[in-house]
Image (spheres, grey):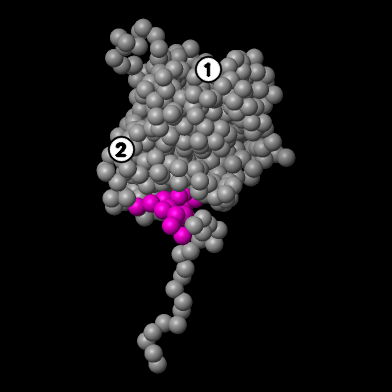
Amino acid sequence: MSGKSTRKPRSRKVADRPEKPYPDFPLTPHASGAWQKKIRGKVHYFGRWARRVNGKLERIERDGWEDALELYKFQADDLHAGRTPRTRSDGLTVIELCNRFLTAKHRQWEAGEITSRMYEPIGPKVEEPKAKGEYPATTDRLIAQFGGTRLVNDLAADDFEALRDSLAKKYGPVRLGNEIQKVRTVFKYGYESGLIDNPLRYGPQFKKPSASVMRRHRVNNGERMLEARELRSLINAAGLPLKAMILLGVNAGFGNTDCARLPMSALNLDAGWVTYPRPKTGIARRSPLWPETVAAIQGALAARPEPKDKSDAGLVFITKYGGAWGSDGVATAVTHEMTKLLRRVGINGRKGLGFYTLRHVFRTVADGVRDPVAVDLIMGHTDPSIGARYRERIDDGRLQAVTERVRAWVFGRERERDEKAAKEPT
């Protein structure tokens, strides 16, 4: 019997990858949808032959090879000489601005100055153009809307009006405002970096939705609030570790990512405290923990699976598959499990309800203490007042008064009423 396998080797060829437009074409198609060439031991990319739409690559018109070739010819001398390519003398194009912007964000990401929610490269190479996060999504949108070879100085108010119209058809007022701000950030970078001589004129329409629009939107969506009875039903129905996360949400105003990335070092369960700067902003945060929260965390730790990745060894919560409940800035597993729980206990049909609703609940109830400084410290909110410059610490008693107010609301009279009703004969 021969020792050789008859199994055919798996092909790495991508079925939709285009052929070269002519035999001597200097670029080759990459599986990510970009045209590429290896120069001086590094892979460089020059435009795209396809874009990712709903998770699938869709080829663009004429596979984009003409624009890619033009960009390659312009940069080839610098790249082969080991120099950083300069922008075209006849003006900065949209794709050049976007590439320079993402390069700057890559450096900020490497330095830990921005989270992976905003920018995270895919692949080990620095030159790899594929990246995920909000900034790459914004630059992809600009290239798709305006065209990569469009000169930035040629953009006018009507171009940005058309962009805003397309965004408004896809997103609600909150997301629309965020997207407009990110677009402005890209062009602001170009001006402050000296790539653009003058600030762009966006026109009077390219701005965030007005305060009145935001108010009407919030009224139409209803309150992002859960009542004490609903919270108790969620807590009672949740298994570990989700129960511990929900209690952290309503006890200390934690959000999805706060729970997903909570390190062991932040907890002092013997004393009943958590000290944990917000992952999103790094703002200091400290909160007492209820006995119910401590017990749930201890239960979760007792049943905690061994993490598969050593980098997750210091996390409090590990999924049943041995992974983290979310990456830096994104906690999809927490969101997904909370959504399933809301449906299971019959709390659905209201817009905007999710794990982050617990921060709304905490703030709404905690404000009854009338100590906004203490509430802000627990939630990790900044205090812009003059007093904050001089305040070195806040007495623990004030923090305990806040959390006890919320605990009494969740488990106080309503709990006594439930227990009394349970004892009464039916």
Q: Which corner quadrant holds the N terminus?
A: bottom left
Residue at 32 percent across and 43 percent down: it is: 77
Give the residue furthest to the bottom.
1
Per the image, the residue denoted by label 2 is 84
Relative to the observer, which residue lies in front, 36 or 105? Answer: 36
The disc labelled 1 sits on which kind of residue?
Answer: Arg
Q: Is residue 350 left or right of residue 90?
A: right
**Residue 314 placed where, x, y %?**
32, 44
Relative to the observer, which residue lies in front, 260 or 409? Answer: 260
Q: Is residue 401 above or below residue 347?
A: above
Depth-wise, is mark 2 or mark 1 nearer the camera? 2
Q: Is residue 296 left or right of residue 228?
A: left
**Residue 256 placed where, x, y %?**
48, 36
Which of the 4 image quarters holds residue 79? top left
Q: Residues within 10 Å of mark 2 (few under 14, many from 20)?
A: few
Q: Is residue 276 magenta?
A: no
Q: Is residue 246 above or below residue 44?
A: above
Per the image, the residue denoted by label 1 is 201
Q: Which corner quadrant holds the C terminus?
A: top right
Upstream in sequence: badge 2 or badge 1: 2
**Residue 38 placed where, x, y %?**
34, 52
Magenta-highlighted residues: 23-38
Relative to the observer, which residue lies in front, 23 or 14? Answer: 23
Q: Kindly state the secondary structure of the residue where label 1 is placed.
A: loop
Residue at 48 percent across and 32 percent down: it is: 94
Which of the 4 image quarters holds residue 261? top left
Q: Is residue 293 above or below residue 240?
A: above
